[in-house]
Image (cartoon, rainbow, N blue to C red):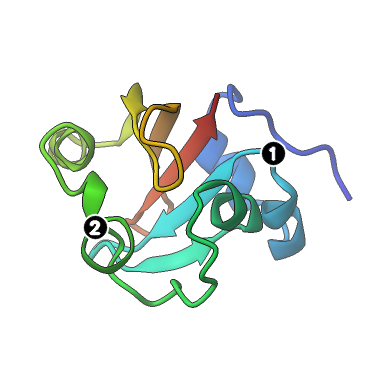
Amino acid sequence: MNALPAFETPKLAEAVEALAPSEIDALPFGATLLDASNIIRIRNKTEAETSGLKDTSTVGRLYFVDVAPCLNNGYFKGKIEKARQNGTLDITFTFVGDFSDSDRELTVRAQSARDGGTWIFIRRS
């Protein structure tokens, strides 16, 4: 197994896309790949375990409708959509709230995927 990229790695999406599925699962932060229609294509084990939503059948479902409707708001989804409209997506922001702990602060990185989708990386403090 190669050294895994850190949450702060420049061009994190590119680094993660070069990993094997088992390596993506081993990342110490959440990693979710959405296609251009916001359908989940990859959701790593860390995200499943730390989000409080351990259901592994989330791949193939709409992220902001079926899996994380609490993030379907102007602050979270809105930031990502606005950055997408402006071109290459590469933003970092904080968000308070999570499935299992509504007071937990999350650091979110959203970056463009090579296939036109979006990677959402979440580190929980």
Q: Nearer the viewer, residue 3 or 79?
A: 79
Locate the C terminus by quadrant: top right
Q: Residue at x 58, y 46 (%)?
A: 50
**Does residue 19 appear in this view?**
no
Q: Residue at x 54, y 72 (%)?
A: 56
Q: Residues within 10 Å of mark 1 (few under 14, many from 20)?
A: some
Left or right, residue 15 beside residue 60? right
Q: Residue at x 69, y 56 (%)?
A: 25
Q: Earlier in the sequence, mark 2 or mark 1?
A: 1
Q: Residues within 10 Å of mark 2 (few under 14, many from 20)?
A: some
- For disc 1, the marked residue is 28
Looking at this view, name the residue that lies furthest to the right: 1
**Does residue 90 appear in this view?**
yes
Q: Is residue 102 above or below residue 105?
A: below
Q: Residue at x 30, y 36 (%)?
A: 89
Q: Nearer the viewer, residue 39 or 74?
A: 74
Identify the image quadrant of residue 94: top left
Q: Nearer the viewer, residue 4 or 115?
A: 4
Left or right, residue 44 beside residue 42? right
**Amino acid type at mark 2:** Phe
**Amino acid type at mark 1:** Pro
Q: Position of residue 35 (x, y in %)?
A: 33, 63
Q: Is residue 10 above or below residue 31?
A: above
- For disc 2, the marked residue is 64
Q: Position of residue 45 (x, y in %)?
A: 64, 58
Q: Is residue 82 above or below residue 19?
A: above
Q: Secondary structure at mark 2?
A: helix
